[in-house]
Image (cartoon, rainbow, N blue to C red):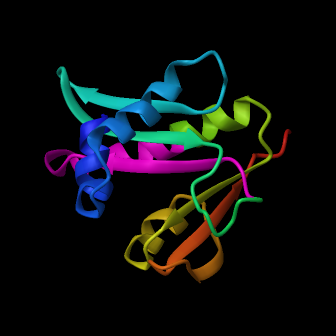
Amino acid sequence: MAERIWRAWWRHNNVPLATIESWSEENLTEAPIPFALVAHENGVFAGTASVIADDLDERPNLTPWVAAVWVEPPFRQRGVGRRLVDDAARACFALGTKRLYLNALPAREAFYVLGGWQPIEREVGPHGVIVFSRNAPTPG
């Protein structure tokens, strides 16, 4: 999982793989957040999504975040990403979280909006990401 995330987002910024591996190890503690979900099909890694406390330096007051959503190319367009994001949100809401955040490049906006995420801010930070939020379902 750490290697896939590193290759997707961090290698080109010269961040060592060991840094990402140490972040991944944080998922193995007793704390409820952070945590990561991993999708497999027939024993083959298909994708991952994490819930972390902070994912955007420009918005340290927002927490928690769905982050590091990655689906391996052969598994794309098959619902794996949607399932990972939805399962991460459900697990976070089960912990008592009332509002969850996510950031993505504008090219991914439709994917998240169709999944129930609301854009709340655009062109944030050096990559011009969109910040999305999703509220916990209301009881009843």
74 on left or right of 52: left
Q: Residue furthest top?
A: 30
The C terminus - image quarter: top right
Evaluate whether residue 79 shows in this view: no
User: At 25% across and 43% down in the image, what residue appears?
Assistant: 4
Residue lying at the far left in this picture: please name it. 74
When asked about the image quadrant of residue 89, the answer is top right
Residue 134 versus residue 79: which sits nearer the camera?
134
Instruction: Where is residue 126? Give x, y as percent.
Output: 48, 79
- With respect to residue 60, does 52 lie above or below? above
Task: Examine the structure image and report whether residue 125 is included in the region drawn in magenta.
Answer: no
Q: Is residue 40 above or below residue 110?
A: above
Range of magenta residues:
62-86
Residue 112 screen position, x and y as percent? 50, 63
| Residue 18 versus residue 101 in the image, above or below | above
Q: Residue at x 32, y 57 (%)?
A: 9
Is 35 left or right of 120, judged from the image as shown?
Answer: left
Question: Residue 117: horizontal and vertical position, in percent?
Answer: 60, 62
Please state which of residues 136 and 65 is positioned toward the viewer in this rendering: 65
Quarter the N terminus occupies: top left
The spot of residue 19 in percent (x, y) is 38, 40
Q: In which quarter of the view is residue 47 placed?
A: top left
